[in-house]
Image (cartoon, rainbow, N blue to C red):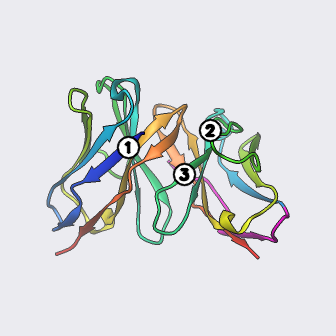
Amino acid sequence: QSALIQPPSASGSPGRSVTLSCTGTSRDVGGYNYVSWYQQHPGKAPKLMIYEVNKRPSGVPDRFSGSKSGNTASLTVSGLQAEDEADYYCNSYAGSNIWVFGGGTSLTVL
Amino acid sequence: QVQLVQSGGGVVRPGGSLRLSCAVSGFTFTDYRMHWVRQIPGKGLEWLSFIQADGRSKYYADSIKGRFTVSRDNSNNMLYLQMNNVRPDDTAVYYCARDFNWGCDHWGRGTLVTVSS
């Protein structure tokens, strides 16, 4: 049950795009299409942004998109806005009814 | 609307016990699997536990296996996390969350558990 690997920080200018990565193994990210992404603002509960690798829940702007290649999943935020500044966590199903989170990436909008 | 209202956090001594509760409303509880997730203040999220909709199957992260027990009362729309033999490194904000296609689409506001003598 090792944590997924996320870079600790990322940044981008308003209106630009940024891609956050999440690296796991063939036992989690690479083995299942059950990767989800969460946005968390300080003092708030996490919010689901992407599920099943690339699906958006109702109400999540289409500026947020997800993808996966091999053992690495990615979250792309296009048209960056000030409100996108937050921590982002990836999560993957790891088989046998176990899930694992990444360490999180702090996104700064410059 | 979907609501998950948490209670039961507080200060507990090492080796002690605490039960966290999560009262759900706004959806058919028996249709959904549920999770517990925690977050050490200033740190990342850690998945802890998962319970099937009927409550028959339960799963745990290695960090809490044998010490914590998840349960649910489908008659009263309640989810629980019984925490026994707690340790200082169990100090965290604990969240309950509703499973949605192997993600978590609704979360409680979290409850802080502090393990300290």
Q: Check disc 2 and report its element: helix, strand or loop.
A: loop
Q: Earlier in the sequence, mark 3 or mark 2?
A: 3
Left or right of residue A47, residue B5 in this image: left
Dot 1 and dot 2 residues touching (CB under 8 Å): no
Q: CA distance from mark 3 to mark 1?
A: 14 Å
The residues bearing labels 1 and 2 have C-alpha atoms spaced at a distance of 17 Å
Residue wearing tag 3: A47
Q: Amino acid at mark 1?
A: Gln
How would you classify the magenta stretch by its main secondary structure?
Answer: loop
- Report the span colored magenta: A1-16
Rendered location of residue A26, percent (x, y): 66, 38
Give the foreground label among 3 and 2. Answer: 2
Most foreground residue, B78 or A96 = B78
Q: Residue at x 40, y 31 (%)?
A: B33
Amino acid type shown at disc 2? Ser
User: Where in the figure is residue B23, as x and y percent of width and height?
Assistant: 27, 42
Residue A9, numbered circle: none
The residue that mark 2 highlights is A58
x, y (%) of residue A70? 76, 40
Residue occupying the point 25% across, 36% down = B71
User: Amino acid type of disc 3?
Assistant: Lys
Q: Residue at x 60, y 40 (%)?
A: A28
The chain that hosts pointer 1 is: B
User: Does residue A10 show up magenta in the picture?
Assistant: yes
Farthest residue toward the right? A16
Residue A106: tell me if it is visible: no
SS category of the residue bearing label 3:
strand
The answer to whether A65 is drawn above or below residue A85 in the figure is above
